[in-house]
Image (cartoon, grey):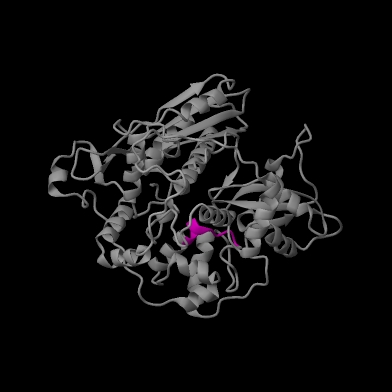
Amino acid sequence: MEFLGRLDAQVKLRGVRVELGEVESALRSCVGVRDAVASVVEVGGRRVLAGFVVPVGSGVDVVGVREVLRGVLPEVLVPSVVMVVDVVPVDPNGKVDRRQLPVPVLGDESVFVAPVSVVERAVAAVWARVLGVDVVGVESSFFDLGGDSMLAVSLVGALRAAGYPTSVRDVFAYRTVRGLAASFGEGVDEWEPVAPFALLSDADRAALPDGLTDAYPATQAQVGMAVEIAKDESAAPYHIVHTMRVDDELPFDVEPLRATLAELVARHDTLRTSIDLTGYSVPMQLVHAEAQVPVAVHAEATGHSAYVAAERDRPFDLATPPPLLRVAVHREDDPAWWLTVSVSHLITGGWDLNLLLADLRDGYHRRRRGEQPTPAEPVAVRYADFVAAELSALDSEADAAYWREVVTGTPKLTLPGTPATDSGPRQVCRTEVDIADLDGALRGLASSLGVPVKAVLHAAHLKVMSQLTDERRFYTGLVCDARPEVRGAERVHGM
């Protein structure tokens, strides 16, 4: 089964599609709230979900509002901050004008409990810096203050740099400054960055062309994708097409877009990477010194939908020079326009695709207004470090023994209708599934269990699979983002 995605414009936050109307409806249902609006805003250099409520009378308990929302919405849809306003601003056409909303202050709305010990004070200071808030109490929840899995990686890296050994698992397990500070122990491995070309054999290094800044083996996931693409060039899951409508105050200008793309290409190795599957002893990633993203500008938006549909059937040739990325713009009546980004899944995942889109949007807007974008903080970790970690795991007998024990005794899952061989033509059956009537119940169940909606859907997938086989024990795949647990790793691009 392949999820083909959506063609409409999306509002995304931390990789999750956010329906602002759903958040607003939940806000309006709270006691003491007459009207409400939700918006994704930038606070402390981060994009967070904020709720703005108009009280019925003189005031409303914003802490109570967030507690109510936790009971009816998944965690990612609970605003990081709720702010009281006198009125919901509207534009001359009577539509909500989110640009007129005040800038909220992100911080702990619960009773503040100050850190006491030296360790608690140090952890709280790092916590506040990572989250972009002024102060953090020892009972503050990392996730209540806007934290997520990506920021957890950043937090772990910053704490390790300060001399406090911890892990992302610990952040999720303990959640508060007090709990995390009490959990510190030994056993966290030290990290050393990988030097350019250090992961190559002498023969492969000698065969490299000029003009490269690094090269390293392709990961197992990349090789698997490449094989699937070679078998079927229209393999849709590995050709990502994302389109969104941009409402701007100024008419579109291609030069700020090109300048922002050039900056991102220079910053991220993966955007200058090509894939060579056969020219070396192993499938290889070649990082070039330069690459230029093609940008196509269309004068009218009438052909936008047709372009997106056609673009989904126009995958990248992995043998071509980098980047495995292209951009198209369809102009509407100024100042609105459509941005379409096509990228190969071999060089990006859901995690960094959203980083790329956010940086592209923010960099364009700043340059379009005549401002200089804030320089990105340099990070020591690179995608090559993740490749090195995977190669180390593949060479580890302890890792191999663990997984052998996990899968021993479990037969290969065979479903009804599975062909004896995989040599026949690929058959695709597409069925649209409308779950609008189940959406509320699914989100409510996820909230009651304290898990994301995707975990509930994964459980449903396993239940369906169990009905299609007589096996009492079986496995199914689950794709996860992975990065070294070091400072800055959450900003590194790569599949």
The tally of labels here is 0
Q: Residue 123 in magenta?
A: no
Q: What residue sits 51% from the left and 76% below the top?
A: 120
Spot occupied by residue 171 in the image (x, y as percentages of width and height) = 49, 67
Say if residue 358 shows up in the picture.
yes
What's drawn in magenta, residue-wise? 145-152
- Give the camera-side residue of 233 and 61: 233
Say if residue 373 shows up in the picture.
no
Horizontally, residue 464 falls left or right of residue 325, namely right
Horizontally, residue 382 falls left or right of residue 115, namely left
Q: What residue sits 49% from the left and 79% below the top?
A: 182
Horizontally, residue 311 falls left or right of residue 228, namely right
Spot occupied by residue 82 in the image (x, y as percentages of width and height) = 70, 57
Spot occupied by residue 296 in the image (x, y as percentages of width and height) = 46, 24
The residue sitting at the bottom extreme is: 117
Position of 266 relative to 400 (above/below): above
Horizontally, residue 397 falls left or right of residue 248, namely left
- Give the camera-side residue of 167 and 477: 477
Spot occupied by residue 49 in the image (x, y as percentages of width and height) = 63, 52
Position of 298 relative to 147 (above/below): above
The residue sitting at the right extreme is: 57
Q: Quadrant of residue 326?
A: top left
Q: Residue 149 in magenta?
A: yes
